[in-house]
Amino acid sequence: MSETYAPAPGLFERLGFTGGAAALRIRYLGVIGFQLILMVAFTSLVPRFIGWPNLQSVLFTAAIMAIAVCGQTIVVLTGNLDLSVGSVMGLTAYVVFDIAGHHRGLGPYVVLMALVIGALLGLLNGTLVAVLEIPSIVATLGTLSIYRGFVSFYAHATEVTVGQLPPWTRAVASSRLLGVSSYVWIALVVVILIGLALRWLPGGRTVYAYGSNPKAARSYGLRSTRIVIGAYIASGTIASLAGLMLGAQVGNINSLVGDGFELQVLAAAVIGGVSIWGGSGSVYGAAMGCIVLATINNGLVLLGVQEFYRQLIQGAAIVTAVAIDALVQQQVAARLSRRSVERAAA
């Protein structure tokens, strides 16, 4: 009977990747392979692409995105989205540095202020999604506009100038360690810490458990409201740190700083293997997705490709990543179905 009703082996099984976890690992290998192909292609077209100064530029561009993607990853793992990341970054950067410009003695409290603002914005997002049960894409699309509108009203068509920024923030933005920007090291530390927390802390494991099957998780007794709100608070807090670093980098901050970052961060997460349906993926893969996007943008700029075509290519990368994600989900579901049939027939 088992031979009669067992479904045919899936694509990944025929390739030798048996089991859901093994099937998902192929995506990480695919990201690394794609990155290598990009580097070879751009180097053949623009030899200076492979130079150390340009590779530093790629890593520097990916650093802030890699920090922001950590928060987005936590939210996506719960099966939700946070489209307000760019607005949280912009609001935090403008408001905090504007206040710092008028109160020179704040010092390191600038960072604490940014984290609190980000946490509160994340709390609002989480409340809308978990308590009021508004679909996350609708709720965070709304707060994206609200946060951006608030900072535009607050800024009143003015800018925070470089002179208003605390000198130490500019020093951090321009400093290097072992020839690499401090931003890259900060991003590396943040990614590793968040990755370890998701892997080893009970709270991190509940995020995966909830995202894999929300109904089953609630039946098991997991507090879904607390998990989702906590994920959004984490996303807002991490995005505020990324916004602070972005503000220190650009110097002159206007109300549009961080605009469009939300799509880049979401694209990086999906390209890096974080399942858009929740419960699968890691911040390490998402960080790799940031490097891929930074490489594409950098290479296309060196080739003189216009911004319109760069956005077109980036959009194609997102669609391709989501399509691959759907394929992986189908293969994993087929594998699980096959196991169930085999166990029932045993």
Image: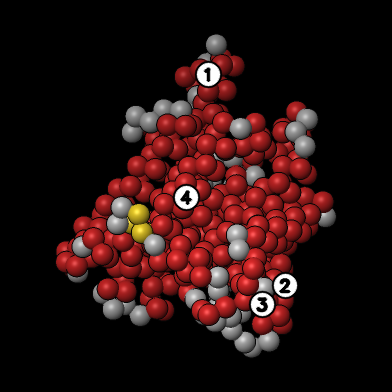
Name the front one of labels 3 and 2: 3
| Circle 2 SS class | helix
Q: Residue furthest top?
A: 346
Q: Is residue 38 left or right of residue 149?
A: left
Please give the name of the residue rendered at 29% of the width and 57% of the height, measured from the top-left corner.
179
Q: Picture quarter containing residue 10?
A: top left
Q: Which residue is mark 4?
A: 286
Measured Cα–Cα span from mark 1 to mark 3: 69 Å
Colouring style:
secondary structure
| Circle 4 SS class | helix
Q: Residue 102 shows which numbered tag?
A: 3
Please give the name of the residue rendered at 33% of the width and 68% of the height, measured from the top-left corner.
298
Name the front one of labels 1 and 3: 3
Label 3 environment density (alpha carbons within 10 Å; few <14, some 14–19, many ≥20): few
Measured Cα–Cα span from mark 1 to mark 2: 52 Å
Q: Which residue is mark 1?
A: 342
